[in-house]
Image (cartoon, rainbow, N blue to C red):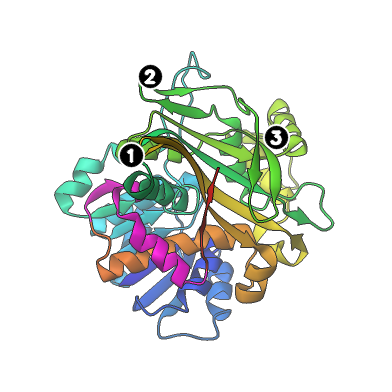
Amino acid sequence: MRVLLVGAGGVGTAITRIAARRSFFDAMVVADYDPARAEAAVAALGGDATRFRAERVDAGDEEAVARLLRRHACDVLLNATDPRFVEPLFRAALSTGATYVDMAMSLSRPHAEQPYEKCGVKLGDAQFAQAADWEKAGALALVGMGVEPGLSDVFARYAADELFDEIEEIGIRDGANLTVDGHDFAPSFSIWTTIEECLNPPVVYEADRGWFTTAPFSEPEVFDFPEGIGPVECVNVEHEEVLLVPRWVDARRVTFKYGLGEDFIRTLKTLHLLGLDRTDPVTVPGADGPVAVSPRDVVAACLPDPATLGERMHGKTCAGTWVRGVKGGAPRELYLYHVVDNQWSMAEYGCQAVVWQTAVNPVVALELLATGAWTGAGVLGPEAFPARPFLDLLTAYGSPWGIREH
């Protein structure tokens, strides 16, 4: 297996450090718009020149990405960029016959008249619209293969196959007790992506209604997270699992709720009120004349890079899937979860907990594809594959998961 990794930010860098310890692939080309980032990611591995090399590429330039795939004879494109670049990377992979893997799907667009009731363009719609092309080519696009979406979807598949006879509700619940020294507001993940998923209308799935939307931060609930994290208020947020899980898992209701906290929600609402969540450029004065900039990009530039926060970060992050249903004629309620302690991830990999937890899952998936434990063609989510091989290999990577019976 020869992999083109596009994106050498926090998650991309963590992917290289996790993958460097595994032998299932022959080469990994680490490409980024900023060549210094790609070179730094490779240099940190201690000079494994036989398998890793750095390149520059514009993720938005489909032809340039395709040329890079061909030049290095890469048979896999792993997308570690933000969702703006999903579509050109997705097309570049198909044009070269490469397997495609991402951790976030193509962007949504709210319904023009009823954004908090009806879906417009849903997350991933642009990719699923091309599923027949991938099937015809005999090629695989494994979409949403991070932690959420990704591992959370694997948990849903595992619950359906082995833990329940009938499923009433699947609810992805994400929470943490992370703090960052010296910062009152320092998101542990890309603020660009965080704004996108938190301020868009959240999607809910119900079997008798299909997909529909609600207002941002709706249906607050307090969820008690394991391993000392404790109770965290969670709210509805737009996320891929709600669009993926019902395609392969029979459940009457599917939701995604994120533990954000009052201060975080208040800050996001203020950004929205001021128009600083917008992606369309605005014109501002510059030293050499007017400059067009995206307000959201300005916000991102003003905040610390999440990849640099690890040394000042404390606590744990938890990703998991809460499932309610019936087993053997009796009601059952479980939470399948994965917790990462920042102290451990920093000591073991030099990566903060949230980016490491995201990064480990696509590497596990690549290894399953390389060994043939996972196979398929078309545009498929993690739910389309057997869960047990993934969960066993994740444990073998030194990152066990758990189940809590409610």
Q: Position of residue 213 (x, y in %)?
A: 49, 23
Residue 352 lies in magenta, yes or no? no
Q: Which badge, 1 or 3, is on the more N-terminal residue? A: 1
Asked if 141 appears above or below 234 in the picture, the reply is: below
| Horizontal arrangement in the rendering, residue 135 relative to residue 390 (left or right) | left
Residue at 57% across, 36% down: 257
Q: Indicate which disc residue 165 carries.
A: 1
Asked if 214 appears above or below 330 in the picture, the reply is: above
Segment tinted magenta in the rendering = 376-398
Q: Which is more foreground, mark 1 or mark 2?
A: 1
- Alpha carbon distance from label 1 to label 2: 22 Å
Q: Nearer the viewer, residue 90 or 232?
A: 232
Mark 3 Cα-neighbour bin, 10 Å: few <14, some 14–19, many ≥20 = some
Q: Amino acid at mark 1?
A: Asp
Q: Check disc 3 and report the residue beneath it.
A: 268
Q: Which badge, 3 or 2, is on the more N-terminal residue? A: 2
Residue at 47% across, 79% down: 21
Q: Position of residue 177 (x, y in %)?
A: 72, 51
Q: Residue furthest front?
A: 329
Q: Which is more foreground, mark 1 or mark 3?
A: 1
Q: Position of residue 405 (x, y in %)?
A: 53, 47
